[in-house]
Each structure stands twice: as structure tokens, then as C-alpha cells.
Image: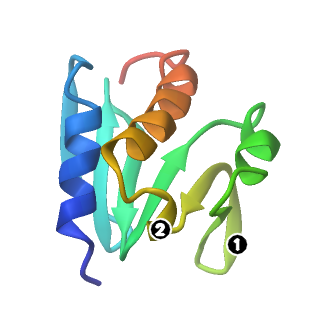
Amino acid sequence: MAYDTELAERLLDATAALADIATRKMFGGYAVMWRGNMLAGVIGDDLMVRVGQDAYEEALARPGAAEMEFTGRPMRGMVTVRAEQVSSPEQVAGWVDRAAAFVGTLPAK
């Protein structure tokens, strides 16, 4: 599956201030890892974001957000955000901040 390379660039720009960032192909798309933990990524035209269990419901209530499903099962703690809601660098940065708030609590791998 191809992914939106422009969205991937916006995602990389939004994570530039974080140390220990790595990228890889994952879920048929593009993933950004922070300290060895998945932070966010791009699947097709959409952003996927790891927000954790505690912030999951609040994240789903935001415009364009939906459950992330992989192999037909929802992945609680991860959401996808439709392309039209992450078309600007500021929108992507807002989601990266949400993801970093959770992933920053995880031990480095």
C-alpha cells in the first residue's frame, strides 16, 4: 500500500524536536518510532497516532479521528485521522503532541 509522502514529511517535521527518532515501513505504510516505541505513522492518506488507553476516547471525539483497525480488530490506544484533518503542519503537530504525551511515559526499548 502506498502512503502520502507529503503527510510523512509533515510528520517528520513535527517530530524534529524529539531525540531518538527512527522511521520504518510498517502496516503497509510509514511509521515513526520514538525511543523504540511507535509514536505515529501514515497509512494511505491518513495519519495514525498512538495516544494510549487513557486519552483514547477523547482523541476519538476530535474531528476526523476514528478507531484504528488492523486485521479487522480495533487497536485501542491508537487512532487514525482522516487526511483532511492533517493537511497543515499545525494539525499534524497537534496530534504528534498528543502522541508524545503518551509515548513519553513508556520506557525506551
Q: Amino acid at mark 2?
A: Glu
Query: Which quarter of the image is occupied by the C terminus?
Result: top left
Q: Indicate left or right for 22 with 74 as reference.
A: left
Instruction: Return the residue found at the far bottom.
Output: 1
- Please name the residue shown 63% across and 63% down the image: 64
Q: Indicate left or right for 73 with 30 as reference.
A: right
Residue 24 coordinates in the image, percent (x, y): 21, 53
Numbered tag placed on residue 73 in the rendering: 1
Q: Amino acid at mark 1?
A: Arg
Between 33 and 99, the one nearer to me in the picture? 99
Residue occupied by mark 2: 84
Residue 60 at least partly seen = yes
Of badges 1 and 2, the one in the foreground is: 2
Q: Is residue 101 above or below residue 4?
A: above
Residue 42 coordinates in the image, percent (x, y): 35, 61
Secondary structure state at the residue bearing disc 1: strand
Q: Quadrant of residue 33?
A: top left
Q: Is residue 80 above or below residue 23?
A: below
Q: Indicate left or right for 25 with 60 as reference.
A: left
Residue 52 coordinates in the image, percent (x, y): 66, 36
Secondary structure state at the residue bearing disc 2: helix
Between 36 and 85, the one nearer to me in the picture? 85
Residue 22 coordinates in the image, percent (x, y): 19, 37
Q: Quadrant of residue 4?
A: bottom left
